[in-house]
Amino acid sequence: MQAVAAWLVAKPLHAVLGLAVTLLLPAPQLTSGVILVLLVLAQGPRLAIAEAGIAASSLLIVSLIFGVSIAAMAELMAGTWLPVLVLALLLVGTRSLTLTMQVSVIVAVLVMTMFYVVVQDPAAFWQPYLDTMSEIAIQNGLELNTEWLNAEVMTLSATLAFWMLYVIGLLLGYGLYKKLPAETREFGRFRNLDFGRVIAFTMALVSLLSFVVDVTWFQNIAFVLFVVFWVQGLAIVHWLHAEEMLPIQAVVSIYVLLPLFQVFLVTTLAVTGYLDAWFNFRRRLKKT
């Protein structure tokens, strides 16, 4: 990992080509986002933005040659790079990983709220996407159960999926940056991540309001605010390993089992992270 990070930073042209090529890979949004964060932190925003501009131009030319929709490609690049770029710039400006992650949660909730304000009929908004998903499933010989894929589930899934996509890109890019052999700046460690009591209190308040006023999207916002704490729970796992309270095998096992027991592990980590926001388990364990 250290060699890859150093190679990308030492070879700007290679990094540009990497940014362009990663958009054509099966998981383009994550890989190109990681590289973009690395370039912003290691080379500075101006050079990284210039390299991303060259990569974007290259992709648009390739799209034009192969008859791919220019508008679709531009939309893909904007949705892939702009949010991650904003997070990377915020990290550089605040010099705080924790503050950057807190802001990302607030922005996710605000975007979700704006969606409910602007979109009067969420079911009609998501129906074309559900139809497309059904067609793809049928073409692959599968049957998509759309009974539970209602507008609320789609909105929740989209909010959490995009938030995770961007923050994982930020965290991995920052992790690569810290692996560089040259001297790097310190923006905080992932294992010390804390979303804080303000977000935890907001989640509790919105949950209470959702029962009092019986507004569905209040429940959805509360759910999003709860689920994001699983990242803090994961940070606690890394902290326990750094303090030699948890073996590396246990950390690896959590990552391996996460796709298999996603609901259980995410819920457990979210509860742990949420309680830590109130009671600061790491500080208490440190004193002990």
Image (cartoon, rainbow, N blue to C red):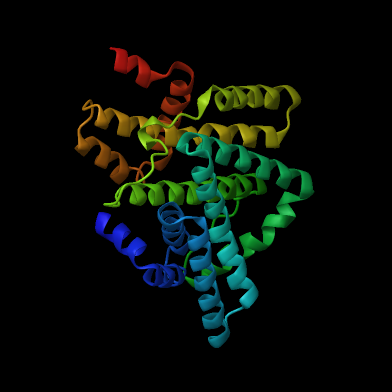
How many marks overall?
Answer: 0
Q: Nearer the viewer, residue 196 or 58?
A: 58
Q: Residue at x 68, y 59 (%)?
A: 127
Could you say where residue 164 lies in the image, as x and y percent from the top left? 49, 47
Could you say where residue 112 lies in the image, as x and y percent from the top left? 66, 43
Q: In the rendered view of the protein, which quadrant contains the N terminus?
A: bottom left
In this picture, residue 119 sits left or right of residue 222: right
Q: Nearer the viewer, residue 58 or 262?
A: 58
Q: Residue at x 50, y 43 (%)?
A: 91
- Residue 143: in sight, yes or no? no
- Residue 177: in sight, yes or no? yes
Asked if 22 appears above or below 43 in the picture, the reply is: below
Q: Residue at x 43, y 51 (%)?
A: 41
Could you say where residue 133 lies in the image, as x and y percent from the top left? 57, 63
Q: Residue at x 30, y 52 (%)?
A: 180
Q: In the rendered view of the protein, which quadrant contains the C terminus?
A: top left
Q: Residue furthest top?
A: 288
In this picture, residue 141 sits left or right of residue 200: left
In this picture, residue 117 sits left or right of residue 260: right
Asked if 39 appears above or below 252 in the picture, the reply is: below
Could you say where residue 37 lies in the image, as x and y percent from the top left? 45, 54
Asked if 27 appears above or below 269 in the picture, the reply is: below
Q: Residue furthest bottom?
A: 65
Among the 4 quarters of the image, the one containing residue 251: top left
